[in-house]
Amino acid sequence: MKKTLGCLSALFALSLGSSAFAHHSGAMFDNQKNVTLQGTVVEFQYTNPHSWLQIMVAGSDGKQVQWGFEAEGPSTLLRAGIKAKSFMPGDKVTVVGHPMKDGRPAGGLVSVTKADGTVLSPRPQVPTPGA
Amino acid sequence: MAAAIAAAILPGAAWAQTSIRENGSKLYFSKTVPTYKTSWEHYLALKAKAHGGTKKTFAALPNWGGLWERDRRLEGWAYAFDTDERANGPLSAPLNAEYKAKYDKKMADLAKGIEWDNLSFCLPAGFPRWLTEPRPREFILRPEETWLSTEQQSEFRRVYTDGRPHVPDDEAYPLWEGDSVGFWNGATLVVHTNNLKEGQYQRQQPDYTDQVTTVEEIRRTGPNRIEDRITVYDPGSLTKPWTSVQSYHRVTDPPTLRVNMWSCNENNNVVKDASGASTFILPGEAGYKEPSTLGKPPQQ
């Protein structure tokens, strides 16, 4: 398993983190840390209230572990260019997320890098029209 | 939590210079309004000032078409009810001692990682919290009635502008969106709402009681903005009426975006743990609800 942890330093990331979980508290995630995992897509649940990207990750002991990463619902993801078929079962991906504080294999989705190098983030900064 | 973390990292002076609007523009409505003993007196005063209101035909209704989304503050907690409120700054709501203590406990619990939101039970946000939610909105206008909708939980507010009164007291009971009547003052929709459930303005925001009533003035103030000036009356939690301006910008990208039916139950594995904190049931754990199996016909 490739796994790295790093500190977020920008206000940008904090404000996005706070906006991500409108249907439940975000306190279960450690928004000051990132986990980066390489894995294979098991399922992309493009659903409300939140979408989940489920991936299978090989541990250093060879054991497969399923990780789930939560993102926004379809109307928000579509605006970020993430569609229902953006991640198909079997796709190889590298996922960055804020891990659960309790250590279980899940987190809040920050970005996904696909095999072709495409990077998708559920919360890009989108300029809004003026008044 | 984010507000607390951010406040710990960045000094207060930095917050004070940060724009609270996503596009930084000034608002049409100010927060300075005359207030009254009750929201109904407030509403009747606005109606008298409008000489009873403007009778609308379809052709005379303003155009509130398209999709809209609430302007967030860009710092700290994005969904403060009064977006002038600053992280680590004074609370905007004039709370009484009881509700200030409840708010302080809520924030103290949050600092310990304990936070629960009834939305996680798949319950509606309810009004006035409804104003702060982040999903796309649509506003449907008819001369006799206006529907104000948000995608989240497919929550609709219905505002009757045909002159009918509120439901009689002996039929009234607390409702998620309350009972709303209104009138048009030119291009401004004036709304009075009562019969509401108790709730919270947002997570990391104060609570309100089921005595809460409101007066709103809603207007399209530009090609890409709708504003809602709301004065909240809640003698159970507030020491005086509380006015704020909610603003919504037009959503145009992608042009294919639609508001769809929104079911919270199709993928909700959020549960409250023994401490009262929010957590998930994950795949493979007891009680996990696999979304791909929900909604299918029952097996014979």
Image (spheres, grey):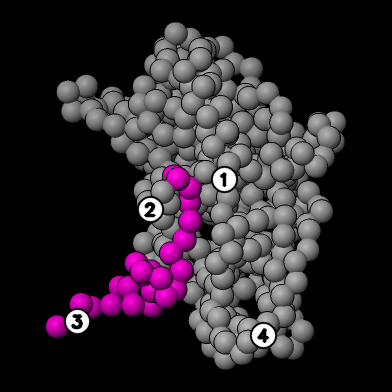
Residue ranking furthest to the front: A61
Amino acid at dot 1: Gly
Magenta span includes B216: no
Q: Give the magenta-colored segment's residue range.
A: B275-300
- Determine whether the residue tagged by mark 2 lies in a helix, strand or loop: loop
Label 4 – label 2 distance at C-alpha? 39 Å
Displayed quadrant of residue B211: top left
Location of mark 1 (residue)? B113
Location of mark 4 (residue)? A60
User: Left or right: B169 with respect to B156?
Assistant: left
Q: Nearer the viewer, mark 4 or mark 2?
A: 4
- Main secondary structure of the magenta stretch: loop
Residue B146 vs residue B60, the one in the foreground: B146
User: For the point 65% across and 72% down, which residue is it?
Assistant: A81
Discs 1, 2 touching: Cβ within 8 Å: no
Residue B81 is situated, as x and y percent measured from the top left of the image, at 57, 34
Displayed quadrant of residue B253: bottom right
Location of mark 3 (residue)? B299
Q: Nearer the viewer, mark 4 or mark 3?
A: 4
Q: Which mark is residue B122?
A: 2
Label 1 – label 2 distance at C-alpha? 21 Å
User: Left or right: B64 with respect to A32?
Assistant: left
